[in-house]
Image: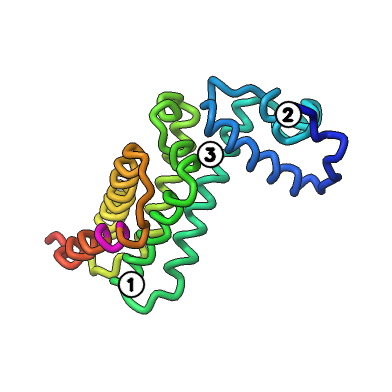
Amino acid sequence: MPSSRASNPRLTATARREQILDVALEVFGRAGYHGASMNDVADAAGVTKPVLYQHFDSKRALFRALLEEVGNRLLSAIAKATANAPDGKSQTQRGFQAYFRWVAEDHDEFKLLYGGGTRRDDEFRDTIRHVTDEAAEAIAPLIAVDIEPEHRRTIAHALVGLAEGASRRLVDIGENFDPDEVARQVSDLAWAGLRAVHRVD
């Protein structure tokens, strides 16, 4: 296949980095971390390896940055969806809706972040744990219940796990699904549970 390097337009450093991350998502999504090489990413991005290494000094650094980028996209989607929700029930539904739309629109991002192979690596597992912690920290203030902060954080992590578990099943089945319908089903369960939460004396 002919290289696109000759016609590849000059980009700013920031734009080039974003382009490389978008391409790397496709490459790693197809081949996995161990099956993909920096050559594969450079060829797909239409850049030379020296240019690739200007932005990421190793495959591990590139993959770690990719995990962080995917995590940030998820967190941004949830924050944007819940920002103007009028009440707790709406916040719950909109948060799950944003999550399941993210999963439905790009299975590769979900698999990259929550794939079993990624979690077997200590460094990558720590990055994913950070994303999960950030998601729980973003959700915790939305739990409109008079409970202790630690209790609130535990419930927030449980909600993140609920969304992840449902998404794993949907992605494993490999069929298209209606993210809004799944969000309604899961948020109904979550909201019913949240209404029963109370302060522990």
Residue 49: mark in rendering: none
Colouring of the image: rainbow
Instruction: Give the percent coordinates (x, y) of residue 71.
Output: 50, 46
| Callout 2 crowding tier (Cα within 10 Å): few <14, some 14–19, many ≥20 | some
In the image, is residue 1 above or below residue 149?
A: above
Q: Secondary structure at mark 1?
A: helix
Q: Amino acid at mark 1?
A: Ser
The residue under label 2 is 43
Circles 2 and 3 in contact, beta carbons < 8 Å: no
Are there few (<14), some (14-19), or many (20+) residues within 10 Å of tag 3?
A: many
Give the residue pinned by disc 3.
Answer: 67
Foreground mark, 2 or 3, reads 2
Of helix, strand and loop, which one carries label 3? helix
Q: Check whether the beta carbons of the residues at disc 1 and disc 2 lie within 8 A of each other.
A: no
According to the picture, the residue beneath numbered tag 1 turns out to be 90
Residue type beneath disc 2: Asp
Q: How many marks?
A: 3
Looking at this view, name the residue that lies furthest to the bottom: 86
Quarter occupied by residue 118 = top left
Left or right of 25 in this view: 186: left
Q: Give the residue displayed 53% in from the left and 34% down from the top.
A: 29
**Quadrant position of the C terminus in the picture:** bottom left
Q: Amino acid at mark 3?
A: Leu
Of labels 1 and 2, the one closer to you: 2
**Quarter assignment of residue 49:** top right
Is 177 magenta? The answer is: no
Span of residues in magenta: 182-186
Secondary structure under the numbered disc 2 in the rendered image: helix
